[in-house]
C-alpha cells in the first residue's frame, strides 16, 4: 500500500500572525514557517503504519511556492520516502488544493490519503472532504484512532458528542485530529539522509489541473479586542464585581 | 431572489442548539429560510425545527440511510435539494465541518467556513489564524453559496414559529463504502457546553482526574456546563468532547470561569465570544489575565471552596 501525505507550509503555531499594513494579507517575511501541525501528525501516522509493515511507501506532497521545499525536506527527514512539489505562484484555496492533490494521488496510485483536518493558517477544514467528494471515495475526518485491516479502515472520530467510530473501504481520505499521535523529533542524521531522497517538482498544468472557482479575499483585519480586564484581590471582590455586572 | 437552505443538526430525537443559532445567521442573509432534516424518522426533529422563529418550510427527508449523519450519504442528497436554493448552510460544528465541504465539492462551489458576520448575500467575515485575523471574503454569485455558520457568533432565534413540514424524497444513489459503527457519548445531565449560559473550565492546573471533581462541583452549583483545556484532555482528566478552543468547541456563554488554564491562543480562540471571562490562576503572569474581564491570582484549591461557600 502507498500512502499520500499532503503537507502545507504554514506560519509556526507559536508565532502570532501580524497583518500587513495595507490589510492585503499576513506577514510571512522573516517569520518561522513549519509543517502544519495536523499534517505532521498525519505523516507520523503514515510512518507508524509503514513501520508496522502495512505500507510500502510514503509520498509527501505540497501545492506551494518553491520555498516549501524546506517543509518537504523536513517531511523526508521525518520518514517520507519521496516528495512532490506542485509549484505554483497563485492563490491555493481548498477547491484548487483538492483538485491538485487528487491528480497527484492518481499519478501515485496511493490507496490512503492521510492529511490534516485543518490548516492552521486559513482554518478552512475543507480540503480532505472536497478531495474525497471529487474522488467519489470515503472520508474519515477528525480521526483520533486509526485501525487498518484488509481493505478497510476503522476510524474513531472526535465529534462534538463524543467519539464516533466508522468503518470505511479503501481507497479513502483520512484527516487527523491532535490526539491521533505525537510526532517524533527529527534527528540530525535523518536530515542528512533526507538530502539524498527524491524531491520531484511538477506544475498544475503538467498535472492537468482545472482551475475551480475560489473565494475572493478582500481584507484582513484584527479581531475586535475585548475591553481591558480588571484584577480583583479576593473572592469577595470577585463575587461583588460579578453581581454588579449582572453575571451572577 | 435569495432562498436559503439550512441543514439541521440533530441526534435523531433532539434538534441541536447549533441549528437555532445558525438560523439567526441565515436570516441575516435573507428572509426565506427552509430547514432540511435528514433522518430515518424525521418526525420529532422536524417539529422542533418548525417551531423555530422565522422558518418557511421544514423539509423532512426520511431514508433508512439517514439514521446516522455520514458525510458520504448526506452530501449527494444535499446537492440534490440545493438546486432550488441560492445558499446552502450548515452549522460549523463537527457535523457541518464534516459534511458541508463534501457537498460543496459535489456542487462545484467553494465554501465559506465559519461565517461570523454577514455583510451582504455574497460577502462574509470569517476568522483565520485561530481567530487572530478576520478576513472578508466574497463568493462567486453563481451558482450558489455554500457555507458553515459559526454558532457562537449568533444568538439563537426564539421558538413559537409554525412552519409547514413537507416530506421530501431524494433519489441520489448512496454509497455503502462508509459505515457507522458506534458513538461513545458521555451521558451527562449538565448543560450542553456549546449552548450553556455559564461554563466552568479546568486546565492542567487542576492536576488530575480526581481533582476535577472540584470543577464539576462548582459548575453544578452555578448550573454551568463544564469545559477543559487541551492539556486537561490530553492528560486524561476529562473526555475529548469537553475541550474548548481552536480544535475543540467554541463557546459563547454569558459567564466563562476558568481555573488553572494558562491562556494559550488556541484556548482563548474558543472563548472570545463569552460575555464575562473570569480567570483564576496562581501565576500572576499567566497570559489568560490579558484577556480576562476579571482575574484573581490564587490557588484554585483554596479559591473554589471559598466560592462555593460564599455563593451559598
Ligand atoms: C494546533 C494546536 C491546536 C490546539 N488546540 C487547543 C484547543 O482547542 N484548546 C486548548 O485548550 N488548547 C489547545 N492547544 C494547546 C495549547 O497550545 C496549550 O498547550 C493548552 O491550552 C494548555 O492548557 P492549560 O492552560 O490547561 O495548561 P498549561 O499551559 O500547562 O497551564 C496550566 C496553568 O495552571 C496554573 N496552575 C497550576 N496549578 C494551579 C493551582 N493550584 N491553582 C491555580 N492555577 C494553577 C499554572 O499557573 C498554569 O498557568 C492546541 C495546540 C496546538 C499546537
Ligand atoms: N496547498 C496545500 N498543499 C498541500 N496540502 C494542503 C494544501 N492545502 C491544504 N492541504 C491539506 O489539507 C488539509 C486541510 O486544509 P484546509 O482545508 O485548508 O484547512 C491540510 O492539513 C493539508 O493536509
Image (cartoon, coloured by chain):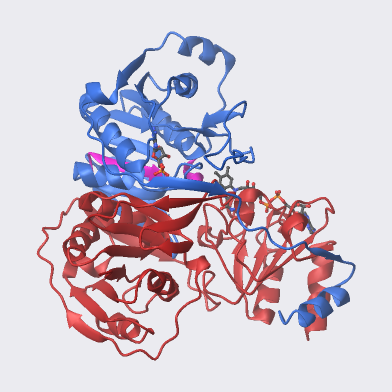
Q: Which chain is blue?
A: A
Percent across and percent down for residue A199 are 38, 15
Residue visible at 30% across and 33% down in the picture: A101
Q: Report the span colored magenta.
A: A169-181
Q: Quadrant of the C terminus of chain A?
A: bottom right
Residue at x 39%, y 26% (from the top left corner): A89
Is A59 contained in the magenta span?
no
Q: Which percent across, then down, holds residue B82?
A: 21, 63
Q: As rendered, which of B49 and A158 lies closer to the eye? A: B49
Q: Residue furthest front?
A: A22
Residue reaching furthest to the right: A233
The structure residue drawn at horizontal position 72% and vertical position 58%, both measured from the top left corner, is B291
Residue B29 in the figure: left or right of residue A38: left
Horizontal side, residue B306 vs residue A74: left or right? right
Is residue A173 on the magenta stretch? Answer: yes
Residue B151 in view of the camera: yes
Chain with colour red in the figure? B
| A202 vs B94: above or below | above
Q: Is residue A65 above or below residue B125?
A: above
Q: Is residue B235 visible?
A: no
Q: In this rendering, is residue A7 above or below A94?
A: above
Instruction: Quadrant for residue A225, please give it.
Output: bottom right
Q: How many marks?
A: 0
Q: Name the foreground residue: A180 vs A39.
A: A39
**Residue A104: x percent and y percent?**
26, 28
- Residue B54 image offset from top left, x and y in percent: 36, 83
Amino acid at each position: 500500500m502507498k500512502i499520500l501525505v499532503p503537507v502545507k507550509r504554514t506560519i509556526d503555531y507559536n508565532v502570532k500572525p501580524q497583518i500587513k499594513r495595507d490589510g492585503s494579507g499576513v506577514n510571512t517575511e522573516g517569520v518561522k514557517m513549519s509543517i502544519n501541525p495536523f499534517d505532521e501528525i498525519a505523516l507520523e501516522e503514515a510512518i507508524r503504519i509503514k513501520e508496522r509493515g502495512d505500507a510500502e511507501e510514503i509520498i509527501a506532497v505540497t501545492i506551494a511556492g518553491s520555498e516549501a521545499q524546506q517543509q518537504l525536506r523536513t517531511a523526508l527527514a521525518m520518514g517520507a520516502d519521496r516528495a512532490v512539489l506542485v509549484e505554483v505562484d497563485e492563490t491555493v484555496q481548498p477547491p484548487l488544493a483538492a483538485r491538485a492533490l487528487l491528480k497527484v494521488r492518481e499519478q501515485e496510485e496511493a490507496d490512503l490519503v492521510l492529511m490534516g483536518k485543518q490548516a492552521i493558517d486559513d482554518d478552512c477544514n475543507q480540503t480532505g472532504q472536497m478531495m474525497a467528494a471529487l474522488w467519489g471515495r470515503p472520508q474519515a475526518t477528525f480521526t483520533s484512532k486509526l485501525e487498518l485491516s484488509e481493505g478497510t479502515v476503522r476510524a474513531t472520530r472526535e465529534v462534538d458528542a463524543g467519539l464516533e467510530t466508522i468503518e470505511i473501504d479503501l481507497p479513502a481520505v483520512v484527516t487527523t485530529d491532535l490526539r491521533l499521535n505525537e510526532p517524533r523529533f527529527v534527528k540530525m542524521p535523518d536530515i542528512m539522509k533526507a538530502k539524498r531522497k527524491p524531491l520531484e517538482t511538477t506544475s498544475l498544468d503538467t498535472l492537468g489541473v482545472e482551475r475551480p472557482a475560489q473565494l475572493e479575499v478582500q481584507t484582513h483585519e484584527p479581531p475586535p479586542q475585548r475591553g481591558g480586564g480588571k484584577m480583583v484581590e479576593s473572592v469577595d471582590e470577585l463575587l461583588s464585581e460579578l453581581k454588579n455586572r449582572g453575571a451572577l | 431572489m435569495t432562498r436559503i437552505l439550512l441543514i439541521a443538526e440533530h441526534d435523531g430525537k433532539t434538534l441541536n442548539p447549533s441549528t437555532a443559532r445558525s438560523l439567526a445567521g441565515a436570516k441575516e442573509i435573507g428572509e426565506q429560510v427552509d430547514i432540511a432534516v435528514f433522518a430515518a424518522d424525521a418526525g420529532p426533529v422536524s417539529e422542533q425545527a418548525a417551531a423555530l422563529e422565522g422558518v418557511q418550510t421544514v423539509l423532512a427527508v426520511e431514508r433508512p440511510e439517514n439514521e446516522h449523519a455520514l458525510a458520504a450519504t448526506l452530501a449527494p442528497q444535499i446537492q440534490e435539494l440545493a438546486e432550488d436554493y441560492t445558499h446552502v448552510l450548515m452549522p460549523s460544528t463537527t457535523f457541518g465541518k464534516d459534511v458541508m465541504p463534501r457537498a460543496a465539492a459535489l456542487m462545484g462551489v467553494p465554501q465559506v467556513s465559519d461565517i461570523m458576520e454577514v455583510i451582504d448575500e455574497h460577502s462574509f467575515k470569517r476568522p483565520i489564524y485561530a481567530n487572530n485575523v478576520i478576513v472578508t471574503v466574497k463568493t462567486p454569485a453563481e451558482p450558489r453559496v455554500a457555507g458553515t455558520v459559526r454558532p457562537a457568533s449568533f444568538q439563537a432565534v426564539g421558538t413559537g414559529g409554525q412552519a409547514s413540514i413537507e416530506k421530501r424524497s431524494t433519489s441520489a444513489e448512496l454509497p455503502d463504502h462508509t459505515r457507522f459503527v458506534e458513538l461513545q457519548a458521555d451521558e451527562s445531565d449538565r448543560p450542553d457546553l456549546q449552548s450553556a449560559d455559564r461554563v466552568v473550565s479546568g486546565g492542567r492546573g487542576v492536576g488530575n482526574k480526581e481533582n476535577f471533581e472540584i470543577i464539576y462541583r462548582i459548575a453544578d452549583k452555578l448550573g454551568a456546563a463544564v469545559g477543559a483545556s487541551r492539556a486537561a484532555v490530553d492528560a486524561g482528566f476529562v473526555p475529548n468532547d469537553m475541550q474548548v478552543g481552536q480544535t475543540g468547541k467554541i463557546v459563547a456563554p454569558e459567564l466563562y470561569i476558568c481555573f488553572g488554564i494558562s491562556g494559550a491562543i488556541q484556548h482563548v480562540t474558543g472563548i472570545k465570544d463569552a460575555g464575562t471571562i473570569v480567570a483564576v490562576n496562581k501565576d500572576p503572569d499567566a497570559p489568560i489575565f490579558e484577556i480576562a474581564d476579571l482575574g484573581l491570582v490564587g490557588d484554585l484549591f483554596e479559591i473554589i471552596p471559598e466560592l462555593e461557600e460564599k455563593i451559598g
